[in-house]
Image (cartoon, coloured by chain):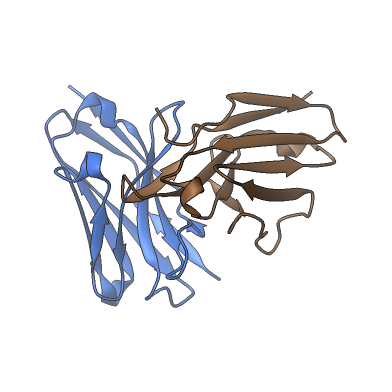
Chain colours: A brown, B blue
Amino acid sequence: QSVLTQPPSVSGAPGQRVTVSCTGSSSNIGADYDVHWYQQLPGTAPKLLIYGNTNRPSGVPDRFSGSKSGTSASLAITGLQTEDEADYYCQSYDDSLSGWVFGEGTKLTVL
Amino acid sequence: QMQVVQSGAEVKKTGSSVKVSCKTSGYTFIYHYLHWVRQAPGQALEWMGWITLFNGDTNYAQQFQDRVTITRDRSMSTAYMELSSLRSEDTAMYFCALGPPTARYFQHWGQGTLVTVSS
């Protein structure tokens, strides 16, 4: 059972916009720790998608964006493409656990 | 070109130990944190701990504190993760990942090492 809660799955048609939520608590996201997002394509290692709540590493398309408010964060993907089908994980730091924590992961299906 | 390369797959018996390596190259990561993250089949990512390549300081997740040891060979820019008293639930893909010294995220990932534990 993960400290950060994500929906198990989301879906959308090509070209549409989807969002993935990540809900934490006062000991992690609510304690003002940054939220980061990773994309994991089938059978591969995770890849950093968003860091520091809203920042994209070089090479990540601007179709991907992140936001944070209170004890929650969101990843938005616009202009969905078939290659976006993957698992998406949020990650932060937790004071009570004194460690890095992940969400349960959300599987994105592009219909 | 930055590279993070892990050692190959392992098959281990219940109760034994496994040691996985992670070599970094192509960039000076000396001040980065080198983390270990595992992923059981069909499950979420789980952080295990980190080591600093500079001075070897370590920090372990509470659930692994009594079974994991992370070490490094600074001259070879290589880190190692040893997990002891293996049980079937430890069957997973183990990733190493570099994190910047001033932020708490995982910037560059290794390809993963599959560890299979059976009796």
- Residue at x 59% of width, y 31% of height: A106
Residue B56 relative to residue A86: left or right: left
Q: Nearer the viewer, residue B78 or B68?
A: B68
In which quarter of the view is residue B80 placed?
Answer: bottom left
Residue A80 position in % (x across, y down): 81, 37
What quarter of the picture does the C terminus of chain B occupy? top left
Residue A60 relative to residue B39: left or right: right
Q: Does B41 appear above or below A57?
A: above
Residue B49 position in % (x across, y down): 30, 52
Q: Does A74 appear above or below B54?
A: above
Residue B76 position in % (x across, y down): 30, 72
- Would residue A45 be visible to someone looking at this image? no
- Would residue B115 be visible to someone looking at this image? yes
- Residue at x 59% of width, y 26% of height: A7
Q: Nearer the viewer, residue A18 or A81?
A: A18
- Residue at x 85% of width, y 33% of height: A16
In which quarter of the view is residue B104 placed?
Answer: bottom left
- Residue at x 81% of width, y 42% of height: A78
